[in-house]
């Protein structure tokens, strides 16, 4: 079984910062806007290198989204940065009308998504953002799993013409995808070939899915692991093909089971190849204060939960 | 530049277009549209340096953003009669498969429109963004925007107003249509706006007033004055007093015609008060 090596724990938001820094040097049309969270979003270097292309808007997210929409008129590619909660729910109507419906080339970059934001608690831990954003016509929705993938995604979305929601997180997590990867929007990445069960994971749950697959293998269960970094457009072909092979599916995400990756996969399978599925996700609940590890455990968002779900779905085949 | 009589004829024809658009589909917003007829006429026929050959990026030309999108009938009429799209297309206002949606949008590709609006309070931010891009592109053209007075109750405006002054965005002219009316009644009874001049000035804007925003010459002079105030470190606000429903006597001085179309008889009365000038579509 292939070993995925953690080359050194890093936060995904730093991958975004590194990607933005590189874009600053390679694409003069890239501009960045931030709502008083420059350090948290790791936008400091871009700001230092290109002060004329960095816009501090203050604690005013609605204005930030509207300004970003306006900045596209004349050819700029705006990247907005704030927490996922303030990037989506707080400004949903601004995104809906001024960005999505208006077809503007805005990149909404959102850190501190999900419960791994930790101690700040539920006011800041959005678990509904993927659902909110994937429902907007024309919106591309990406949830990356580690530093390298987040950096690659940041570079890729600058080349994509259209609105994008890029979701990443706060804590240091395993960095295991290739440093020089080419990020293809809408293309699933198969991490393990397997025959008994398909595990489809996104974001921080991808590393947990790898750990689960290794443990399942020791128990004699062959798990196929798919990293879905793009929630929309979803790589339906990869999902259907794998479900046909294994006959059962587990989805895993740091998000409510309503509106997230699990529902998108369920819809795809129901329409094309009905397959038993279990959803590793939060169960229509808010988060709370705690360490990221404690919260992932309490809300059933780790390798142990994926293993349990895999064993359950295998019995439903 | 057309002379003042030609401009008056243009405005009269626009008023006819407004009435006929909303009458045909028995829906739409004639009141605010009529009140801003002189503003749009002045902007597109005199004040703005704009290309009728529409390009979304709008480089090296003045841009306009309509924030209070419900007054689409006046916007569509003036865009069409300024050459952005065929005047006959006004026949399709609010109909299925039309580019002339109830509220303006880029979604159907209507030339002249650069942002969707209708959900209120978003236009100033968009205008600021485009003004910022003009500065980055070393494009010294001006960005204009129009906002309803009631619309200023939306908090996003004040985020934008604070940003613009705090960052010296001095290539924007935001006009506020002070007609004192909104859907539920007068702004005074719904939610008083207070002293808007003092508010904008306190935020750091350069504010000028147009006493009668339905006097074409006053609007032209006011906007030209506003133009001379750009490039001096401050955003420019024009407080423009208008009468909702202006030019159609029974629609004036009331919020009743905010979002209501005239019936056949009322249309005839309104059209009789605004005789055909440039030719109906």
Image (cartoon, coloured by chain):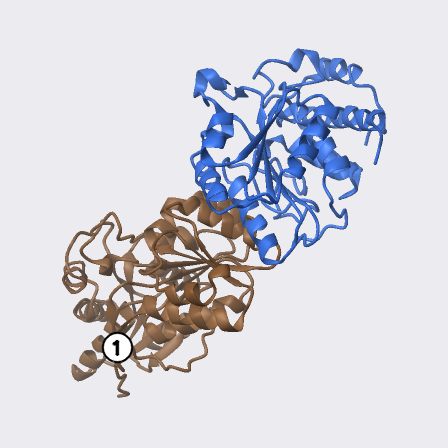
Chain colours: A brown, B blue
Dividing the picture into quadrants, the one containing residue A203 is: bottom left
Q: Where, quadrant-wise, is the N terminus of chain A in this rendering?
A: bottom left
Secondary structure beneath dot 1 equals helix
Which residue does the image show at 32% across and 70% down from the upper left? A145
Direction from residue B105 to residue A131 in the image, left or right: left
**Residue closest to the far top:** B250
Taking depth in this image into account, of A76 and B89 the one nearest to the observer is A76
Dividing the picture into quadrants, the one containing residue A74 is: bottom right
Residue A41 lies, in percent from the top left, at: 34, 61
Residue B82 lies, in percent from the top left, at: 78, 39
Which residue does the image show at 52% across and 73% down from the upper left? A26
Q: Determine which residue is flagged by label 1.
A: A210
**Residue closest to the far front:** B232
Q: Where, quadrant-wise, is the C terminus of chain A in this rendering?
A: bottom left
Does the rendering let one see residue B238?
A: yes
| B16 relative to A232, above or below | above
């Amino acid at each position: 079984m292939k070993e995925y090596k953690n080359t050194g724990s890093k936060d995904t938001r730093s991958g975004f910062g590194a990607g933005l820094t590189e874009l600053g040097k390679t694409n003069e049309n890239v501009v960045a806007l931030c709502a008083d969270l420059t350090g948290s979003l790791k936008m400091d270097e871009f700001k230092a290198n290109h002060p004329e292309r960095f816009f501090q808007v203050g604690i005013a997210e609605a204005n930030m989204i509207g300004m970003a929409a306006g900045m596209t008129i004349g050819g700029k590619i705006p990247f907005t940065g704030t927490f996922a909660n303030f990037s989506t729910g707080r400004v949903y109507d601004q995104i809906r009308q001024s960005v999505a419906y208006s077809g503007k080339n805005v990149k909404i970059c959102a850190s501190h998504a999900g419960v791994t934001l930790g101690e700040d608690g539920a006011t800041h831990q959005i678990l509904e953002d993927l659902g909110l954003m994937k429902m907007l016509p024309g919106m591309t929705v990406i949830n990356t799993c580690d530093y390298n993938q987040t950096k690659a995604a940041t570079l890729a979305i600058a080349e994509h013409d259209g609105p994008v929601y890029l979701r990443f997180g706060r804590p240091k997590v395993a960095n295991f995808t290739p440093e020089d990867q080419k990020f293809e929007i809408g293309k699933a990445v198969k991490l393990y070939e397997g025959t008994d069960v398909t595990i489809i994971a996104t974001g921080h749950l991808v590393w947990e899915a790898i750990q689960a697959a290794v443990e399942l293998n020791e128990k004699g269960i062959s798990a196929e692991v798919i990293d879905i970094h793009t929630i929309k457009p979803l790589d339906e072909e990869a999902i259907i093909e794998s479900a046909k092979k294994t006959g059962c599916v587990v989805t895993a995400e740091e998000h409510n089971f309503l509106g997230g990756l699990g529902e998108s996969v369920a819809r795809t399978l129901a329409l094309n190849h009905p397959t038993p599925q279990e959803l590793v996700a939060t169960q229509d609940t808010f988060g709370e204060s705690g360490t990221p590890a404690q919260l992932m455990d309490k809300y059933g968002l780790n390798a142990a939960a994926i293993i349990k779900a895999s064993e359950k779905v295998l019995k439903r085949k | 530049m057309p002379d003042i009589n030609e401009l008056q004829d243009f405005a009269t024809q626009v008023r006819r277009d407004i009435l006929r658009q909303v009458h045909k589909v028995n829906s739409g917003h004639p009141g605010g549209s009529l009140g801003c007829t002189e503003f749009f006429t002045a902007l597109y026929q005199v004040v703005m340096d704009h290309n009728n050959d529409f390009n979304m990026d709008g480089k090296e030309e003045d841009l306009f953003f309509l924030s209070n999108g419900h007054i689409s009938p006046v916007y569509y009429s003036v865009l069409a009669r300024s050459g952005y799209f065929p005047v006959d297309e006004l026949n399709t206002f609010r109909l299925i498969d039309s580019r002339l949606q109830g509220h303006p949008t880029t979604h159907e590709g209507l030339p002249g429109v650069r942002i969707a609006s209708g959900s209120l309070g978003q236009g100033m931010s968009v205008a600021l963004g485009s003004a910022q891009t003009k500065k980055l592109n070393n494009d010294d053209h001006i960005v204009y925007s129009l906002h309803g007075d009631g619309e200023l109750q939306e908090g996003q405006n004040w985020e934008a107003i604070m940003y613009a002054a705090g960052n010296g965005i001095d290539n924007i002219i935001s006009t506020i249509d002070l007609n004192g009316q909104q859907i539920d009644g007068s702004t005074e009874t719904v939610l008083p706006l207070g002293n808007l001049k003092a508010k904008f000035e306190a935020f750091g804007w350069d504010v000028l007033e147009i006493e009668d925003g339905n006097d074409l010459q006053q609007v032209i002079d006011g906007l030209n004055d506003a133009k001379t105030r750009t490039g001096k470190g401050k955003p420019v606000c024009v407080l423009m007093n208008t009468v909702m429903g202006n030019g159609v006597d029974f629609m004036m001085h009331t919020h009743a015609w905010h979002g209501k179309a005239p019936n056949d008889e009322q249309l005839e009365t309104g059209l009789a008060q605004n005789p055909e000038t440039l030719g109906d579509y």
